[in-house]
Amino acid sequence: MIELFLQEERQRIDRALDELLPAEEAWPSDLHRAMRYAVLAGGKRLRPILFRLGHRIAGGNPDEVLAAACGVELIHTYSLVHDDLPAMDNDSLRRGKPTLHVVFGEALAILAGDALLTEGFRWLASYPPGEGWAPLRAEVCRRIAEAVGSTGMAGGQVEDLAAAGAPPEEARLRRIHEAKTARFMAACLVCGAVLASAPEELVAALESFGLRLGIAFQVADDILDVTGTPEDLGKSPGKDDAQVKLTFPRVFGLEKSQHLLAEMGKALCYEANRLDPSGLLGELVTFLCRRRA
């Protein structure tokens, strides 16, 4: 069931992204070609799926927030484009294709990332359209900005770079994972619910759940960097070890990391089924904790 749900969600989101993004021939065409290359190269579309699922859990119609959900995918893609740059992770492969700076050059990749971040917030500020949605759109923009700003994703990236080669330290590792990955994922789930005018109790429960889901997702990512293949991952494995990054396998070892992930998944499934009686959120947890890509 979850595989069909995810496939259908990705198809809806991909169609909307294609329609909403500026056309390649629109000025400035080089920038728009680069933006479309980065966004339409594929991907799990997990963050917009979480956004739409949060809206569904709170009683809303997910089709009403499709364009807004696409906004968080643009923000996520910006982060990947900048992470792949030579000054950061210096990756040459992303989603099974050459990274943006390899194809378009470093300068245009930086500018495309900047434009995707800005356009993503424009979509969040614009959709769903209408004055009745305006206060909710403003709250969504605030929450997403906090999740990706200096105390969220950007700060986590700074700490991640600074921790390379440092002694293994669990508290620092968890702080990096929460800031760099978990806060944005949690914000996506929460903001979908916010657009459905969810009560504060549900918003708080989804935020707590989303943070723990984000940590589990990153633990799985750490493990896959050790065990995965370029064909499965669509990117180069072994980069974390080569750069002596602070990861769960480096702190706990591979076997214990796998055990910790299984325990996280079990606890998250129990909580997911309480939050979402439809079972979709629980199935998504299982899928993400057992994924191979």
Image (cartoon, helix red, strand yellow):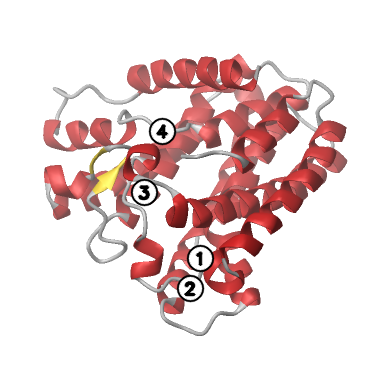
- The residue carrying pointer 1 sits among few (fewer than 14), some (14 to 19) or many (20 or more) residues within 10 Å by Cα, namely many
> Can residue 151 be seen at all in this image of the molecule?
no
Q: CA distance from mark 4 to mark 3?
A: 11 Å
Q: Which mark is residue 159?
A: 2
Residue under the point 40% across and 15% down: 15
Taking the image as shown, residue 30 lies to the left or right of residue 186, namely: left
Mark 3 Cα shell of 10 Å, populated few (<14), some (14-19), many (≥20): some
Quarter of the view holding residue 138: top right
Read off the residue under disc 3: 80
Q: Amino acid at mark 2?
A: Glu
Residue 164 drawn above or below residue 238: below
**Mark pair 3, 1: CA separation:** 14 Å
Image quadrant in which the N terminus is located: top right
213 to 149, vertically: above or below: above
Image coordinates for residue 95, horizontal then vertical, percent: 33, 38
Earlier in the chain: of badge 3 and badge 1, it is: 3
What amino acid type should be assigned to the residue bearing mark 3? Leu
Q: Would you name the residue on which mark 1 appears? A: 156
Neighbour tally class for label 2: few under 14, some 14-19, many 20 plus, Cα within 10 Å:
some
- Front residue of 168/177: it is 168
- Labelled pair 3, 1 in contact (Cβ < 8 Å): no
Q: Where in the figure is residue 247, as x and y percent of width and height?
A: 52, 67
Q: Determine the secondary structure under disc 4.
A: loop
